[in-house]
Image (cartoon, rainbow, N blue to C red):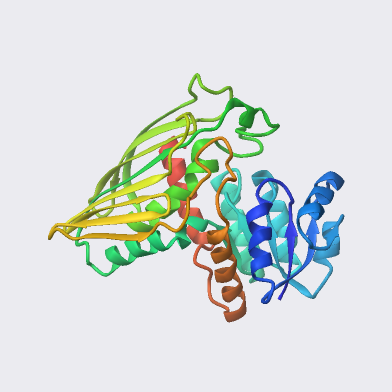
Amino acid sequence: MRVAIVGLGMAVTPHAKSLLDLSGRVEVAYAFSPSRERREKFGDRFPFPRCDSLETILEDASVGTLALLTPPNTHLELVRRCAEAGKHVLLEKPLETSTARAEQLVETCRRAKVKLGVVFQNRHKPAARRLLGALASGELGTLAGASAYVHLWRPQSYYDEPGRGTRARDGGGVLLTQGIHTLDVLLSLAGEPQEVRSFSATTPVHRMETEDLVCAAVRWKSGALGVVEATTSAYPGTPERIGLVAERGTATLAGTLAEIRWHDGRKETAGGEGSAGGSGADPMAFPHDFHRAVWSDFLDAVESGREPLVNGEEALRVHRFIDTLLGV
């Protein structure tokens, strides 16, 4: 399968490494950025052909799939062009800067009958899959509590980059840009929220337009209760954590490690393969294993005609949850 990469900024590294690992299955036909400097820097690190025009990719019928790794406010228009050209799209989160634009994007791919996958790599962690299985099978029994804690650190220099933390480019702050990954996993475990009471703020730690601290209480439709805390002001940053309280045990997912403590005295662990990373000043300090899993799943979906694990509709769930947390 011939694929292309569109966007060679901060997000590209784990994708490029994943595609190198999958070189027996895919051929990277093009890597595109409108910036010559970015193309050259990318070429110093990865052996993929580069091009200076998106049209080159869209007009090449041999390229059926591309990764779109550009800023959120560009997604709707670029996905429209890709869909019209019949290209399947693996899209970096978030879908777009607002839920309304995200819904348009998903509908665009649906009408064009192209696959849309969204890069929520945490869904592919073995630890997350084990907890989902324990809930779905009934092993843990009725869920009573489901909470998420995202205590990250970003220095002011991170937000000094043009567009960072703005509504115009990013669409939001800690929830839409950082916490979205953990919230996506939380929704996959807890289901839909029924009622939310929340507060959000921009702390004195940062000078930015959007929120860097959110605290909320949640009643889930299942009847379970929980809290959501998310911030990029928690120096030096700790791995994101999800906590579950259930009828037959208590479970936690911290970084890549899940622990289940059963009421009969057993303790079970799952995952723990390497460090999740990315919680501190370097947001890209994490392994690319789970991005590779995203790619494998998406390639399987394209080849078989099924939906990817996280498609557009799944991604819209977390966008709507974020709106609720922010009172939008």
Residue 75 x, y percent position in the rendering: 67, 51
The quadrant of the picture occupied by the N terminus is bottom right
Residue 326 shows in this picture = yes
| Count of numbered circles in the view | 0
Relative height, residue 280 to residue 147 (above, below): above
- Residue 191 seen: no
Q: Does 253 appear above or below 226?
A: below
Residues 34 and 325: in front is 34
Q: Residue at x 41, y 63 (%)?
A: 126
Is 294 situated left or right of 213 in this image?
right
Position in image of residue 31 (x %, y %): 78, 59
Q: Nearer the viewer, residue 89 or 39?
A: 39
Q: Position of residue 238 (x, y in %)?
A: 43, 39
Which residue lies most toward the bottom here? 304
Residue drawn at x 55%, y 64% is 294
Residue that protrudes farthest toward the front in the picture: 274
Splitting the image into 4 quarters, where does residue 287 fall? Answer: bottom right
Which residue is at the far left?
Answer: 264
Residue drawn at (87%, 55%) of the image: 52
- In this picture, is 328 found above or below 65? above
Q: Is residue 236 left or right of residue 264?
A: right
Q: Position of residue 271 (x, y in %)?
A: 39, 60
